[in-house]
Amino acid sequence: SSLSEFGQAVGNAYIVREGEIELHTEGLVYRVGPGTVLGLAAGLANQPHNMTATALTVVTASVIPIYKALKAVTSCNPGLRGINRNTVMRTLNLSSVPESLK
């Protein structure tokens, strides 16, 4: 079953606890498993999913609502906010700070 679809809005991020997921993006295919975080960077940047994620096995994951993650990131101290902002920008290869993280 699909956990995310390319181009759809990100409402939740997921931390994979158990299972295997296949990611499809721009003609590339990746297989990931426990420890993988899906959708967090795109959700914090208010961007759509940049890949489709499909469960290959039964997956157990922790759910992080994006609105809660944004609230936590924007209310933390400036140093941690900067680390989060830079991490999101590097992960998504952005050249400017997303409005949601200013």
Image (cartoon, rainbow, N blue to C red):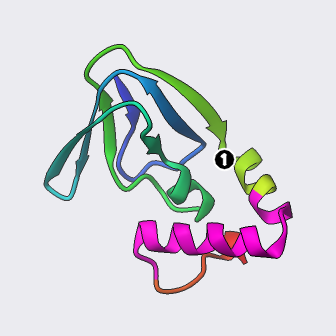
Question: Please, what is the three-letter code of the amino acid marked with disc 1?
Answer: Ile
Please report the residue visible at 86 percent of the width from the left and 62 percent of the height from the top.
75
> Along the line of sight, which residue is nearer the eye, 101 or 85?
85
Q: Nearer the viewer, residue 95 or 90?
A: 90
Magenta segment, which residues? 73-94
Q: Main secondary structure of the magenta part?
A: helix
Using residue 8 as the reference point, say whether residue 65 is left or right of it: right
Q: Inspect the magenta stretch and tell me whether residue 83 lies in it.
A: yes
The residue lying at 73 percent from left, 68 percent from top is: 80
Q: Image quadrant for the C terminus?
A: bottom right
Circle 1 sits on which residue?
Answer: 66
Q: Picture coordinates of residue 91 (x, y %)?
A: 43, 66
Please name the residue shown 40% across and 19% down the image: 59
* Residue 1 on image: x %, y %: 33, 21
Q: Is residue 90 above or below residue 27?
A: below
Q: Give the quarter of the image for residue 96.
A: bottom right
Magenta region includes residue 18: no
